[in-house]
Image: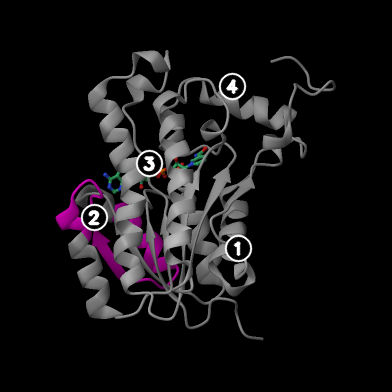
Amino acid sequence: SLKLMEGKRGLIMGLANDKSIAWGIAKALADQGAELAFSYQGEALLKRVQPLAASIGATEMVECDVANEASLDALFARLEEVWGKLDFVVHAIGFSDKNELRGRYVDTTAANFRTTMDISVYSFTAVVQRASRMMTEGGSCLTLTYYGAEKVMPHYNVMGVAKAALEASVMYLAEDLGKDGIRVNAISAGPIKTLAASGIGDFRYIMKWNELNSPLRRNVTQEEVGKSALFLLSDLGSGTTGDVLHVDAGYHVVGMKAVDAPDI
Ligand code: NAD
């Protein structure tokens, strides 16, 4: 039987290690026959991400700091050179100073506000701008967001404000590119223990809370985010754009602590 991603080529941005959400997505796509390229932040990460990529048959690894437009240009110039055409892109990148992922939002500094918005919001638009030029036969673009965009979550602070802007940019990008057959969506993932998440204050408590109070009474895995990404990036998701798909064990529908949930 034909695999869902057979003949499709895509870029995965944001692989740091085997706990990364990008890794769960990459595995699901490779399993369905996708040909993948990876970008990684800084040469120091290469020795960790190269064996991961190699284990799923990917050889194209390009260094890219999304804060740097020349670095983004070089990444897409390289893809243009080796592939010419692109079918999908996954943006699994976010950053904020961890000193501001605790305490009060009201204390956010101007410098970290700007950095957070630049890396966690604008970079997706910058990536889609370049990727869409290579999506000559249509395409699918995906970013990662969190419930802290919709409701106040402890310690998420400036990152919540950034994710709200990211979700808004998904809508605007979807409208701009829809006529070219390019879809743009986000997955709102429940809390998952990753390098980026470890910078958030009381993250273990947040995970436990979600486990006890989500409709499924558990947390989600990188693999589950991967399966939903496969839906959005493949033809299965052909009718969906501008959307935020929650992969959070249903937590976003809950209005109050579950009556049967033990205290933590
Ligand atoms: P992670 O630490 O594995 O991945 C974050 C990635 O961002 C890293 O690969 C890092 O190198 C990259 N990055 C940061 N600054 C960069 C820059 N300037 N240039 C290029 N790359 C840069 O953590 P993750 O949890 O897999 O994060 C992926 C995405 O998922 C993020 O957008 C995050 O906000 C989102 N997300 C995470 C969770 C969670 O609980 N882990 C929940 C919802 C959404």
CA–CA distance in space, label 4 to label 2 = 33 Å
On whether ligand 1 comes within 8 Å of the CB at mark 3, the answer is yes
Q: Which mark is residue 94?
A: 3
Please tell me whether residue 140 is drawn above or below residue 191 in the rendered image: below
Q: Secondary structure at mark 1?
A: loop
Q: Is residue 50 visible?
A: no
Q: Which of the two discs, 1 and 4, labels the residue nearer the N terminus?
A: 4
Residue 41 percent coordinates (x, y)? 26, 50
User: Which of these two is toward me, 38 or 121?
Assistant: 121
Is residue 97 visible in the rendered image? The answer is yes
Residue 229 falls left or right of residue 254? left
Q: Secondary structure at mark 3?
A: loop
| Mark 1, other Cα within 10 Å: few <14 / some 14–19 / many ≥20 | some
C-alpha gap between disc 4 and disc 3: 21 Å
Q: Which mark sits nearer the N-terminus, 2 or 3? A: 2
Q: Nearer the viewer, residue 51 or 209?
A: 209
Q: Of callouts 2 and 1, which one flags the residue occurring earlier in the amino acid sequence?
A: 2
